[in-house]
Amino acid sequence: MDKPSTLLVHFDKGSAAMANEIKADLEGSDVAAKVEAMKRAVMLLLNGETLPTLFITVVRYVLPSEDHTIQKLLLLYLEIIDKRDSAGRVLPEMILICQNLRNNLQHPNEYIRGVTLRFLCRLSEPEVLEPLVPSILENLEHRHHFIRRHALSAISAIYRLPHGDQLIPDAPELVERALASEQDASARRNAFLMLCLCGQERAVAYLFSNAERVTEWPDLLQMAAVDLIRKVCRSPNRADKGRYIKIIISLLSSPSTAVVYECAGALVSLSSAPTAVRAAANTYCGLLASQSDNNVRLILLDRLNELRTSHRDVMVDVVMDVLRALASPNLDVKRKVLDLVLDLLTPRNVEEVVLYLKKEVVKTQSGELEKGGEYRQMLVQAIHSCAVEYPEVAGSVVHLLMDFLGDTNVAAAVDVVLFVREIIETNPKLRVSMIQRLSDTFYQIRASRVCSIALWILGEYSLSLAEVESAISTIKQCLGDVPFFTVSEEGETTDSSKPAQQMVNSVTVSSRRPVVLADGTYATQSAATEAISTPSVTPGSLASALNLRSLILSGDFFLAAVVACTLTKLVLRLEEVQPSKVEANKACTGALLVMTSILQLGLSSYLPQPIDNDSYDRIVLCVRLLCNTGDDVRKIWLQSCRQSFAKMLAEKQFRETEEMKAKTQISHAQPDDLIDFYHLKSRRGMSQLELEDEVQDDLKAATGGFTKETDDANRLNRILQLTGFSDPVYAEAFVTVHHYDIVLDVTVINRTKETLQNLCLELATMGDLKLVDRPQNYTLAPESSKQIRANIKVSSTETGVIFGNIVYETSNVMERSVVVLNDIHIDIMDYISPATCADVTFRNMWAEFEWENKVAVNTVIQDEKEFLNHVIKSTNMKCLTPPSALDGECGFVAANLYAKSVFGEDALVNISIEKQADGKLSGYIRIRSKTQGIALSLGDKITLKQKGSS
């Protein structure tokens, strides 16, 4: 298929019919058989068959038929057959068709007239159309709107042909007269569109003459009017722009949601006046509330986000309207709403926003919401962001959120405890109440990670005597009785934490091999293990309260080490605040008993895994510390940890502040730019909106808002040479990468003294690239040039290759000549951009993504940080590891990099390198992503660039 087609019909290749069968059916008198034969003929033609002998049969037997279906199929047949010979002249048999078409245009049946007029819209042969023009014009005044509608479309299509203005020279004038008297909505739209395309001044005059009645127009015509205004106002500094804006403002009250949406978009593109932007924002918010389709909501949120980037001050006023979209059940909509709202926080609206989010958190407790756990996690993260930016609102939500420390959704519980950890450091006023609340709710926590962080908080921020004693008591209650298992004689097993009749959800693991005791008797050892969390557990029951014991007995010795460290800190602080040495020693003894019991459990051979070396060393260190405490060590344990955390928060805040400053940098006026004082402007006859618009335009001009950022050097880098200088045809391409498509502007120069005929640029692609345009033939004069544009669609983030050749003919050479082009490699860097994400999110994605590409480090660079910066620059990614973590010289660097593609794909990179004794770097760069393409492409890019080449 190498010809353009206006028709597409599904065809089953298994049921192909022969031309003589079709011919026989067409010559018969059975109408149904003729209909089927015509359908088969159309399908065969669409699939590349020629059927050269069929035309005369159609003229003789199908043309005279009065059946409407046959006449419609006849027009489809005429639409797709070749109407020109190889020399480009119209076939003489087409003249036979003209009389039939003229008869159809004067047919008493409206349907026949209408479909014939519609067929003429797709006809491009002036020789066939010229004798039909008078009949087409007569149909402009037909009584039925169906015919008038298609007559207007036909006139528009004919007038837009290369020499159409010679066929109907007064078409715009005729259409303008028809539009003035027309009542049918579709006919008026077709007429107005024709004027927009072929006589823009007439369309504008009609629009202004009906400016007061535009709101009464049908929605089809209103949409056409909005499109016209967009086109007319593309040129900057139009004097009558205010009149167009008034029309757009009036159309915002249209009952059609499509018109209202288009008007809001047009209004923002036309004017930067606060009144206009506010009207557009309110319109988008109204549509967001009224539309139920999730795709529509996502598009509206994208539009609102675009407004936020350029008109944040106006968007701040509609933040509560945007929040109402959280009522949508779709998580993607909720996520976009929260992201948008968090960028619009101000001291004025933060309390309202947090109160609304607090109500949403309470709603998630009911269990009625689908994916309530994920939604709660998103809300917690949003509240966390609000509280970090505006600490004064933390007090109103932190106690509510602490109820979710025992959430079954572990990710949400982790977010809550991280929020509590940050707020307790940044808001000293809330410390006492938060520590009390944490001690009261600690037994509800079921997840090991949440327990670890909560224990750290208790150890660092329990300062008074009552708080320290309460924290020690809470931890001991959650650990239960020690030791964790007992040894009894004669094979009987007992669990020290379980009195009789209170064995709840426990499993006893016994050794099959008896142990010989010191006195020579035999015994068995047993350890009670419990599930981390079981649905049957109720808060307050024994199994629920012993959450630390359950986790430790399941083999979580890292948590056991955290327990030991927390108890050590609490005992050290108790020694400072407890006047009674007896009580302090008693607490110290109790802590030592817990630690030794954990060590005893870890060294026994009856748990699935023994204690790891790191946890063992940490617990032993705590035991030694409590037995022999020095002032320096006490200072490290009681002060340095908290100081390090405070420093980490300060650095995080500093980084965020610096990023915000970088984003808010704006272009300034040049020293010799013209200054326009709008206060001296004449305000006569100008509305408030027009005045605001002029002021905003002046401000934009002054601050460089209208200047396009064009980097000529960068443009030159995008030009690729496709052929050699000695080739008869020289070609070079300028590659423009938009997000979802690539545009190749190819300049072809004929360097010979001969005319090149049928010159064609043939391209092919490899990877997820698709050619959009069909290649066309051109004729190139001697030493002349031609600009050829090719569009290529991109569907995923991976390196693609475009290759091809230029084919042409010359007058003295019979065979076609071919010039092979250089390959064009599409760089993955055009599709990924640096992005940020939380450490927790990075780890979750790292565990979830299945595609990994492992690249060995092979570079001449000998400095670890220099190599890291080189990889960051080469891959266009952002380093998530804070600079403070990369400080110092230790001969080893581990860092996480993150980027996001324009298609929403995540790219994760982990760099682990160390310096060898000979000064060379070794290690691995691991890339993970959800799709294979981005992982492989990034790996190839890193392999190519890592040696230090530019």
Image: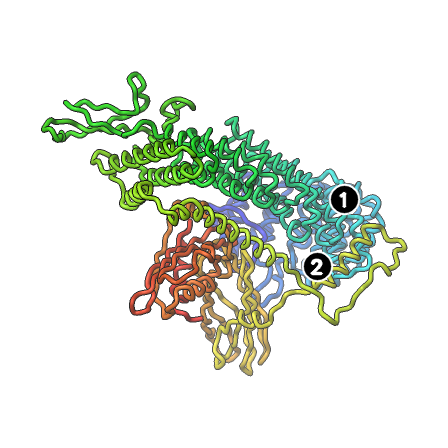
Query: Is 712 located above or below residue 453 in the figure?
Result: below
Which label is found at residue 661? Answer: none
The percent coordinates of residue 497 (x first, y second) are 30, 25
Does 795 sit left or right of 488 as displayed?
right
Query: Is 17 located above or below residue 496 in the figure?
Result: below
Query: Who is closer to the viewer here, 136 or 734?
Result: 734
Q: Residue furthest left?
A: 520
Residue at 67% from the left image edge and 63% from the top image edge:
667
> What count of labels does the image hold?
2
- Give the SS element for disc 1: helix
Q: Which residue lies furthest to the bottom in this view?
A: 753
- Mark 2: few/some/many CA within 10 Å (<14, 14-19, 20+): some
Q: Mark 2 points at which residue?
A: 160
The percent coordinates of residue 144 (x first, y second) are 76, 41
Circle 1: residue type: Leu
Circle 2: residue type: Arg
The percent coordinates of residue 83 (x first, y second) are 60, 59
| Residue 432 appears in the rendering | yes
Quadrant where the C terminus sits is bottom left
Which label is found at residue 251? Answer: 1
